[in-house]
Amino acid sequence: MQEKINRQGEKYIADMRSTVGVLWRKMCEEDGIDPAAKFVVFSETNKYKPFYDKAMSQLWEAEEQYRAGGYVGLRVGKRL
């Protein structure tokens, strides 16, 4: 059971990393920046920035919880 929960957490984090990567590329495209650049400054009007910031925050939180042994990416439902 624990192994299944760990795999689910790892998948959740991998999916979040993928989302962050897509948003990074979209932000760079929006501002005409090479996605491989090491140092960037995005415009204040970049429409993807709020989404990227939120996704990064969620990724950092999930990674921290996972490292601490917490469960990430789980949905607790009510059984009828």
Image: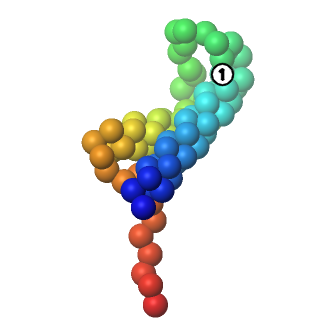
Left or right: 12, with 46 as reference point = left
Q: Nearer the viewer, residue 57 or 73?
A: 73
Q: Nearer the viewer, residue 16 or 43?
A: 16
Spot occupied by residue 60 in the image (x, y as percentages of width and height):
40, 36
Residue 50 makes an appearance in the image: no
Quadrant of the image for the N terminus?
A: bottom left
Spot occupied by residue 44 in the image (x, y as percentages of width and height):
54, 26
Spot occupied by residue 42 in the image (x, y as percentages of width and height):
56, 20
Q: Amino acid at mark 1?
A: Cys
For image coordinates 55% across by 9% down, the residue present is 38
Which secondary structure lies at badge 1?
A: helix
Residue projecting furthest to the bottom: 80
Identify the residue under disc 1: 28
Residue projecting furthest to the left: 68
Spot occupied by residue 26 in the image (x, y as percentages of width and height):
68, 30
For image coordinates 57% across by 22% down, the residue present is 43
Q: Nearer the viewer, residue 22 or 74?
A: 74
In this view, 44 is above or below 62: above
Left or right: 68, with 48 as reference point = left
Toward which corner of the image does residue 37 lie, by quadrant? top right
For image coordinates 61% across by 36% down, the residue present is 18
